[in-house]
Image (cartoon, grey):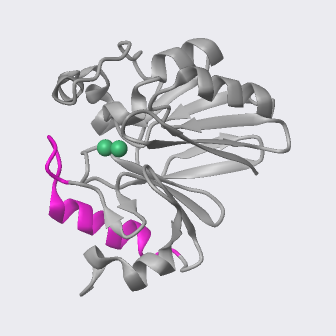
Amino acid sequence: MIFKRLVVGPFASNCYIIGSESNKEGVIIDPGAEAEEILKNIKDLGLKTKFIVLTHGHIDHIGALKEVKDATGAEAAIHTDDAKSLNDHSLGRVFGLSYPPPPAPDRLLKDGDSIDFGNLHLLVLHTPGHSPGGICLLGEGVVFSGDTLFNYGIGRTDLPGGSYSQLMNSIHTKLMILPDNTIVYPGHGPDTTIGTERRGNPFLRGF
Ligand SMILES: [Zn+2]
Ligand SMILES: [Zn+2]
């Protein structure tokens, strides 16, 4: 698997570029900002971008969507329950950020969908709680966890549509059932593993 992590924008969001060695088809996860840097990396890796997948609709994960989509022609995919937040600029105003209006999504995702590129597959896990349409993406031995689970942290639940009980339920029923050696690539901060979080994440104690 071709893999590259970029840290972009004022919220230090992780944008992941992954690609198939077999035919160089690629996926961009969460183009939060810095479109030029993302596009440069796509070019350097020699990838044809098939999908741009958004773990959720918050500005720090979608800020460069329009520019990256315009430049690559890739399909934008987001969970149905976060699709409307693509056009909700209220959070951007709260954070004092502006960005090009994002395009309408090409593909609406639901739990259990598969994102296929080259010989790789990402399984969509619907993990509401941080936002209603938050998703994690499960690949072979890896999970991209968006703002649901972080290295020794969990997503905030005080933004519109957030729910602490939903978030905890999502983490326990969709993520903590994965093998301990599953590598977790979160939406912010360093990677971790399911086992490390199971043992040491202070927000998951007592379960
Ligand atoms: Zn978020
Ligand atoms: Zn975020």
Left/right placement of residue 147 relative to residue 189 reads left
Q: Nearer the viewer, residue 46 or 171?
A: 46
Expressed as whole percent of the image width and height from the top left, the position of residue 107 reads 47, 28
Q: Residue at x 41, y 29 (%)?
A: 62
- Whether 143 is drawn above or below 195: the answer is above
Q: Is residue 21 above or below residue 93?
A: below
Quadrant in the rendering for residue 175: bottom left
| In the image: residue 184, left or right of residue 25 | left
Residue appearing at x 22%, y 24% in the figure: 96
Residue bounds of the magenta highlight = 157-178
Which corner quadrant of the figure contains ligand 2? top left
Q: Is residue 99 magenta?
A: no
> Of 8 and 1, which appears nearest the observer?
8
Q: Quadrant of residue 85?
A: top left
Residue sitting at 40 percent across and 44 percent down?
A: 110
Query: For residue 23, which quarter of the picture?
Result: top right
Query: Residue farthest to the front?
Result: 10
| Residue found at the very far right of the displayed protein | 22
Give the side of residue 42 with respect to residue 32, left or right: right
| Residue 193 spot, x, y in % from top left | 53, 72
Q: State the residue at coordinates (61%, 26%).
A: 37
Q: Is residue 199 left or right of residue 132?
A: right
Relative to 68, say whether 202 is above or below: below
The percent coordinates of residue 156 (x first, y second) are 23, 54
Query: Quarter holding the C terminus?
Result: bottom left
* Circle count: 0
Instruction: Give how far across and how far down residue 203 sits, in percent.
Output: 26, 74
